[in-house]
Image (cartoon, rainbow, N blue to C red):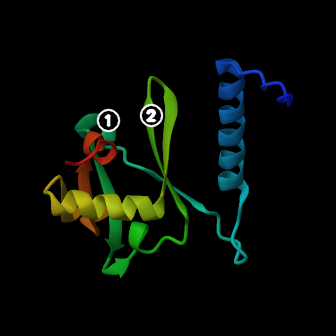
Amino acid sequence: MTRLPPAEPKKSDWDLDLTTGEIAEETLRRILTHKSPEGHVFVEVKTDRQLQRTGNLFIEYECRGKPSGLAATKATWWAFTAEAHGQNIFKLVRVSWLKARLKQLLDVGKAFGDIKGGDDWASRGVLVKIQDLWQDTE
């Protein structure tokens, strides 16, 4: 009779949560500390001061006729920051995801391009409702 090795004990939810948390912590650490060979930080952080009032995000791609913001970034990651209840809240996404998501939302009419904004209305960008950016588009 062949003996089977003892089964590994099932990991508890706590163990799985710990492992998942440690992986996420390491991923975030790498994102926040990694630089390109040229010295570029891989996270671009943007604040939209109108977000709390309007529920919309303005994502700049041009300023004074030149590529800027999303069109000019060398970052791999894009962080949105807003204040809520006296705390800074950050949402971190890949730049490639953000570009694809905005295109998708523009295609279905849930975002609006070529919108003027920024200081002195010198910028152009995409305007999108924050909830549309994070929700699935059908």
In the figure, 9 relative to 92: above or below? Answer: above
Q: Position of residue 17 (x, y in %)?
A: 65, 26
Farthest residue, direction bottom: 66
Q: Which residue is mark 2?
A: 83
Is residue 5 shown left or right of residue 117? Answer: right
Please tell me which residue is depicted at 67% across the width and 52% down the height of the picture: 32
In the figure, 128 relative to 116: above or below? Answer: above
Please tell me which residue is depicted at 32% across the width and 41% down the height of the picture: 51
- CB atoms at circles 2 and 1 under 8 Å apart? yes
Please tell me which residue is depicted at 71% across the width and 61% down the height of the picture: 34
Q: Position of residue 37 (x, y in %)?
A: 73, 76
Farthest residue, direction left: 109
Q: Position of residue 89 (x, y in %)?
A: 49, 35
In the figure, 5 relative to 59: above or below? Answer: above
Q: Position of residue 67 (x, y in %)?
A: 38, 78
Q: Which residue is mark 1?
A: 52
Q: Residues within 10 Å of mark 2 (few under 14, many from 20)?
A: some
